[in-house]
Amino acid sequence: MPDRLCTLHTEENGIAVLDIPGSSSATGMQLLEALQRQFASLARNNDIKGIILTGPAEGFGRCSAPGSTEPAMLSGFGQQVMFNLEKLGKPCLAAISGECSGLGLELALSCDFIVASHAACFGFPAIADGVIPCCGGTQRLARLVGKSKAKEMIYSGGMIDAAEALRIRLVNRLYAADELLTRAGGLLGHICSRSPHAIRIGGEVINAGYDIDLQTACLLERNAFALCFSSFDQREGMQAFLDKRPPRFTGE
């Protein structure tokens, strides 16, 4: 697919910036296929420590139409793409500068968290076309902001502004528009200075335990915590503390 559908830039500090502008001529399936290839490449690249998904103010992840793909096939493929994003094993944030709707919001919800400019807005307008989000958006939104707020947003098809998105915890942080990528990069860079092994395991435990009972989820945490002690990163972190020096984590 054309590179314009999602362009990858790699920073010197191991952070990849995936620019997802969408296109007036791209279908939902075309954008999903391009994203699938990028996520597979990012998962294999050990030099990449973290990922920022971003796009232009006029529409993050916007595409013209679902295309001619059979609806259930489109939904199933789109859901798998979002699962692949969640399972990259590397911290991933969405940096939203303007409108984030439809497929773009489904992508943002699949990241570890979202930061945005004060000019950003969020919504699922699909109801106006007689459909609903299809790539996991109904489920991820409800889990993040609660059932009633998710129903309000999906039933109405309206947009909420950045301040409301922060209030309902859809967004983690708000930044000035001209500082968004710099601040997002600084935040992700700080996170990526921590143990990649512990981040990967921590993310897996949070995701796996989110929708199960507390006792079982805590058992997952216990086993994952014990697993950390078999890693080089844990030994390096402890030794660095004793040596009073910054740790040199490898992700092993």
Image (spheres, helix red, strand yellow):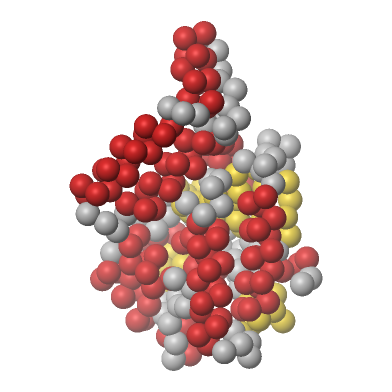
Q: Nearer the viewer, residue 11 or 235?
A: 235
Q: Which image quadrant for residue 7?
A: bottom right
Q: Tell me, yes or no, if residue 211 can be seen here.
A: yes
- Count of number-bearing discs: 0
In front: 61, or 58? 61
Q: Residue at x 60, y 30 (%)?
A: 250
Residue placed at 50% from the left, 85% from the top?
72
Specify whether 13 is left or right of 130. Answer: right
Out of 65 and 123, give the one closest to the viewer: 65
What residue appears at the point 56 percent right and 41 percent down from the top-left corner? 188
Q: Position of residue 15 (x, y in %)?
A: 65, 43
Instruction: Say whether residue 128 is visible.
Output: no
Residue 148, horizontal then vertical, whole percent: 26, 71
Q: Picture coordinates of residue 228 (x, y %)?
A: 43, 32
10 is higher (above) or lower (below) than 102:
above
Residue 3, above or below 175: below
The spot of residue 111 in percent (x, y) is 50, 56
Residue drawn at 47 percent across, 83 percent down: 126
Would residue 47 be found to the left or right of residue 57 on screen? right
Name, please, the residue furthest toward the top.
243
Task: Please name whichever residue, 146 or 184, is drawn nearer the observer in this view of the structure.
Answer: 146
**Residue pushed farthest right?**
2
Q: In which quadrant of the rendered image does the C terminus lie? A: top right
Q: Can you say which quadrant of the picture contains the N terminus?
A: bottom right
